[in-house]
Amino acid sequence: MNKQNRRAFLQTSAGALAVGLNPAALATLRANAGAAKLAAGASPAQTAQSVASNEGKKPLRLGLIIGVGKDPDAAMAQVHNLGLPTCQAFVDDFEPGLVVRLRQALEKYRIEATSLVVGGPGKEVWDFYQGPLTIGLVPRETRAARIAHIKKASDFAKQCGIPAVQTHCGFIPENPNDPVYKETVTAMREVGAYCKHNGQDFRYETGQETPITLVRAIRDVGLDNQGVNFDLANLILYGKANPVDAIELLGPYVQGIHAKDGLWPTNPKELGEEVPIGKGKVDFPRIIARLKELDYRGAVTIEREVSGPQQVEDVRAAKSYLEKLIG
């Protein structure tokens, strides 16, 4: 996202969470030890992670990333009216009473929340100059507050029965000898361990770092509850990788997908342009085919970074387009 603050965008769209497996069940039902082998540095087999919260559910089911705000019923009604069975829920303010209202809305509209998305607190600028200084767990000035915020999000998700917490870690340094790289890995390990204690997966959204840097960091963190939310467009918007190639590195870690499209950056100061699905450079037919080959069992979550009637129109078009590919 370049000219629009991602958190502001999510706050102004209607939003949601869903009642999934409780933490104890999630911990008990984890399907296998594949993630542990990956975290230990084993050679990754080309298959997506097995995630307990996907058991018994349709693979590649569609969803929407949406901000919860203060009216979860309206948020869930929007997801329901779009004909989408899942959502990724962005929550910014964990106010008292919100858990109950969210659970009620999710149950009412039968929406599955596949993850709780969290960002901030503090300023986040989505570009190439201020981004490295403001996004995620990389900046030292905001790191402690963001660790605390993610832990609060994990506790909130636990109360809601949401099986995963998801965030951008930021511009993780390419050089593993960089002190900031080591500090960021330590921060990732701290919040990942906290989520593990709450019976949750901790998911990193792709974007600011190259795929190999993210894989390196995951292995250096060394926890078995880590996963990747594979944002197809972000890899292009940040000029980091072609998602068709990146999936060969990230495939064994993928637990979530952002179905989003975009164009490569041409201005060295600004990200590429996010566009409606089918209008950008993401090769969705090849990506969906590869996800099937990898036996990916999770959701495909639509993200469209505009608001108002245009967003609804574009999400409906994306749903129709993706349904034809998924079959």
Image: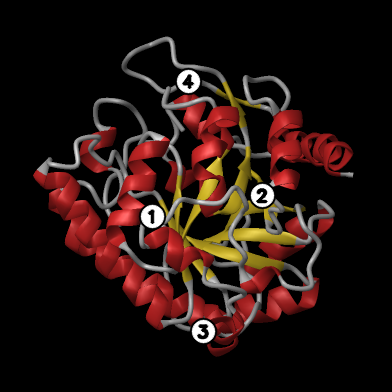
The residue carrying mark 2 is 301
The residue carrying mark 4 is 272
Q: Give the image location of residue 129, x and y in percent.
A: 25, 26
Q: Are marks 3 and 4 in contact (CB under 8 Å)?
A: no
Q: Earlier in the sequence, mark 3 or mark 4?
A: 3
Q: How far apart are the alpha carbons under marks 3 and 1?
A: 19 Å
Q: Are marks 3 and 2 in contact (CB under 8 Å)?
A: no
Using the image, determine if residue 302 lies above or below residue 99.
above
Which residue corresponds to the image point at 68% horizontal and 58% vertical from the top-left?
Answer: 298
Name of the residue lying farthest toward the left: 179
**Label 1 secondary element:** loop
Q: Earlier in the sequence, mark 3 or mark 1?
A: 1
Q: How far apart are the alpha carbons under marks 3 and 4?
A: 37 Å
- Regarding residue 12, the answer to whether it shows in the image is no
Q: Which amino acid type is shown beneath numbered disc 4? A: Gly
Foreground pick, 235 / 116:
235
**Label 4 secondary element:** loop
**Label 3 secondary element:** helix
Foreground pick, 223 / 260:
223
Which residue corresponds to the image point at 55% horizontal and 18% vertical from the top-left?
Answer: 263
Q: How far apart are the alpha carbons under marks 3 and 2?
A: 23 Å
The residue carrying mark 3 is 159
Which quadrant is the C terminus positioned in? top right
Foreground pick, 180 / 50:
50
Q: Which amino acid type is shown beneath numbered disc 1? A: Gly
Mark identifier at residue 52:
none
**Label 2 secondary element:** strand
Q: How far apart are the alpha carbons under marks 2 and 4?
A: 20 Å
Foreground pick, 203 / 141:
203
Q: How far apart are the alpha carbons under marks 1 and 4?
A: 21 Å
